[in-house]
Each structure stands twice: as C-alpha cells, then as structure tokens.
Image (cartoon, coloured by chain):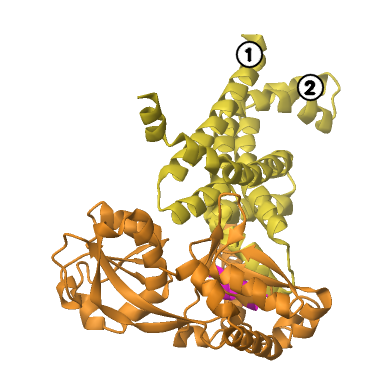
Amino acid sequence: MKKGLRSSIVLALILMLALFSLGGCGNSDVAGENNNENEVAEQTSDAYDQIVERGYIIMGLDDTFAPMGFRDEKNEIVGFDVDLAKEVFARLDLEVKFQPIDWTMKETELNSGNIDLIWNGYTITEERKQKVSFTKPYLKNRQIVITMADSDINTKADLAGKIVAIQNQSSAIDAVNTEPELVASFKGGEPVLFDTNNECFMDLEAGRSDAVVADEVLARYYIKLRGPENYKVLDEDFGEEDYGIGVRKTDVKLLEAVNNTLDEMREDGKYQEIYDKWFAE
Amino acid sequence: MIDYIWGLLQIDYIWGLLPALFSGLVGTLKIFFITLLLSLPLGILVAAGRVSKIKPLVSVLHLYIWIMRGTPLLLQIVFIFFGLPHVGITIERFLAILIAFVLNYAAYFAEIFRGGIESIDQGQYDAAKVLGFNSVQTFMRIILPQVVKIVFPSVANEIITLVKDTALVYIVGYGELLRAGRIATNRDASLVPLVVVAVFYLAITWILTKIFERIEKKFAYYQ
C-alpha cells in the first residue's frame, strides 16, 4: 500500500515535470530550440517560399466575429477582412484557405504553423508584438463606451461604482487597463469578462451590466442591428488603435508582400471599395 | 392573425438558420459516433486489463485513468493539439479531437465496466472453469454478457454526456452545432439561434433515450 502510494507520487511528479517542460517550450522564443524537420521547421525559417510552392495560404480567423470575419446564412465565410484578404492574395496568386480558430488560441495556432496569418480585427498592441509581427495598420479603430440610452453615465469618470462588461482576450481590456485607477473604481474592482461582444451587449440589455467597452467597428455593427435608438455612445473613449495582420516573426517575405499589396490597393481604390461595402453609412 | 403568429415565431428566420446548423450538426455527430465506436471497445479492453493480475499493466492503466479523469477534457484537447507539436508530434485537427475524446471516454467507460466486472460473483468463474471454459472464453461468453446488462444504464448516461461534450472542440475551431449557433447569434445579435441549437440537442437526446429504452427491454430476458 505504502509502496504503491510512493510510486504514484513519483509518477505524478514526473508527469508534472513533463508538462512543465512543454510549457517551457511554449514560453521560449518562437525561433527557439525546436529543430524538428518538417512541421516545426516552419517556425525557424521564412515559410513564404513554401507557401508559394503549395499555392495557398491559411488564414486564421474566429468565424464568430462579425463583421470582420464570420459566416453568412449560407454558411460561407464573409466579412471585411475576408474580402480584403481574398483581394490581397488574388494579387499574389495565392488561394486563401480560411481556418476557424478559437480567439484565445490565435498566437499558438500561428506559431505552431497551423495557420499563416491572424487576420480578424486583430488590434496591434505592444504585448502582441512580442509574439507576432504586424503589418502596417490597415484600419483605424477606437475603444468606445456604450450604455443604454437612458443611462446616467455620461463620462468615463461616471463608470465609478458601475459594472463594466468587456470581451475576454480583446484589446478593449488592454485599453481599459491603461487607466488602472478607473478600473479599480469599477464595481468589483475589475471589468466583467464575457466570451463574445454579443454576450456583453445582452448583459447590458438585461440590466446587469451598466456599460460595455468594445471595438468601435464591432460595437457599431451590433448597435445597428439592435436599434441605434436604444444605445448611447460616450464622447470620451479609451483611445485609438489600429488593426493589423499578424504573421510569424520569421515570415519577413510574407509580411513585405502583404504590406506592398495593401499599399497598392489603397492607391488604386480597391481598398476604399471594400471599405465602403462594409462600413459606409 | 396567422401571419402575426408566424411572424412571432420567426419561422422564416429559423428556416434560414437551418442549413448552417445542420452542417454544424454533422460535425457534432461525426465526433459523437466515431468516439463512441472506438471508446467502447477500448474501454472494455482497459477494464479487462485493470482487473487482470499483470501488475505493471494494472499500474499503467491506473495512471492513464487517473490522468483522463483527473484533468478537464478541454485541457486534454489543448495538450494533444497544441502541446504535442512542441515535442515533434503534429496531429491534424480532427484527428487530435478524436484522440482526446476516445482516450477520455475510454477511461470513463473502463471504470464503469470494471465496476460491472467486479460485481460478478466468483461462483460464475468457478462454474465456467468446471464446464471447461478457458479464461478468455469465460470473460467473453460468461462474464461480459452479464456485465453489459449491469452497466448499461451508466453507459447510456455517459453517452448522453458525450453528445454535449462535443461542444468543447470550439477550442481548436472545429465546426460543430454549438459553434454554428454562436456564429449566427453573433452575426444577428439574437438569441434565437441558440434556442434552435437547444432543440437540436434535445432531439438527439430524445432519440438516444428511445434507443436505450429498447435495448434495455431486450436485455430484460431473464425477468
């Protein structure tokens, strides 16, 4: 009995060690120690030639993420980012394969080579720059505060003592956290986190949350669907930011190709055309 | 009036949702059936190993069951899909899901079966021996048929849990019923798609329950 217990404990420790060493790998530099021949080789060298050779690129997106990338009634992946990506890669003679991913796993998916790009309303932040390379910004965005129309909240300072809902793992959290005193004054001392912006809005409507902080692009989409007269957007915001496309740090050629093509599309008006299709009033 | 009620029920809207939800349903059923098909036999094998007298095998299986039941299935999917590439093993998305589900469910099934096997009276083994059965024959012909009857309600319970656990594959972005519902919910800013998804799950469970009732009736041949 005793002996069995002891060997179990040893086994458990070995197992934990194994798991930690796995985690260690994950934390180390992307260009790290993995010299595995085939799959992981993608992490250590520029994958662009490989991508060109196989003729398609895999774009990772959260297909629950309207209006940037989501599925329409026919189950087809559509959205502003999707149209933009299709045009960019058509010009580069590449087919785009859309791979749905979970948003919390996006950088892991990218750096393990399952996808070649993160392109889905992906905000450029300092923290993310540690993990991926960003293209030049392709869309401006603000972090806005939304309340119900009859709310007495009119400034950011009014959020003190209120319940504030934010989407988990979103750049809205980073934006709000740049003002720690304000966050500490929220009811509960921190925002309430939901999986999607939609859930934030439902909580706001149910009266449990007093305000939502969200990407303007996304928030406007929901407000439009649910009736603009029901909501109020504060004049103050939590700062402006940019959407970029994330690629592996090693994929310098890919980054350059996407950057150049986007510039080209801005010049010849194609960018504006796609922009108008999705965001024109 | 009728038009009003139809409008209230949002029939047209729901009708429009169905193609996407059905394709999600296919994803769910794929995981469900393949997992079931593989994990049940594997579970029986593991249970047989657990009650065997081969010590190293028993301890290995003990460890396996402990890990599978001791960590969330979600974590197991993450480790198999995102963790294994770090040690040079890269597995395709759907295969990774299946490996996680089969290993996890086999562990639960194994424990259910072990309980069943251990509830069989020693007299059954003695009688089989007297009749000249060897140990494999005894297990397959005498013990297992009785075990199956005993454990059936618990297995049925696990199977229904499996239907709903399939939703966990959202973590690797695999399209299934609940994800299809969430996509529509986010797109249309409406809860209706999730209500339809709930009806889908209920329908699956209802069909399974009916099948289980039939099987249980068949098993009742000694009563």
The kind of secondary structure element at disc 1 is helix
> Which disc is residue B128 wearing?
2
> In screen coordinates, is A116 left or right of A142?
right
Q: Give x and y (percent) for residue A105.
A: 55, 69
Q: Which mark is residue B75?
A: none
Calculate the distance from the C-alpha at mark 1 to the C-alpha at mark 2.
22 Å
Q: Nearer the viewer, residue A82 or A103?
A: A82
Range of the magenta residues? Answer: A105-112
Q: Eyeballing the image, is B120 above or below B221?
A: below
**Residue A15, position as x, y percentages in the image:** 61, 67
| Residue that badge 1 annotates | B220
Residue for point 73% across, 78% down: A40
Using the image, determine if residue B220 lies above or below residue B159: above
- Residue drawn where x is 37% and y is 66% of the image: A220
Residue depicted at 67% across the width and 48% down the height: B102
> Could you tell whether B2 is left or right of A249 in the image?
left
Question: Is residue A125 among what the camera can see?
Answer: yes
Chain ID at mark 1: B
> Can you say whether B30 is above or below B124 in the image?
below
Residue A65: x, y in percent?
49, 63
Q: Which quadrant does the C terminus of chain A fall into?
A: bottom left
The chain coloured yellow in the image: B
Residue A69 to residue B42: above or below: below
Q: Earlier in the sequence, mark 1 or mark 2?
A: 2
Please tell me in which quadrant of the rendered image residue A97 appears.
bottom right
What chain is colored orange? A
Residue at the top extreme of this rendering: B223
Q: Relative to A68, is B190 on the left or the right? A: left
Q: Residues within 10 Å of mark 2 (few under 14, many from 20)?
A: some
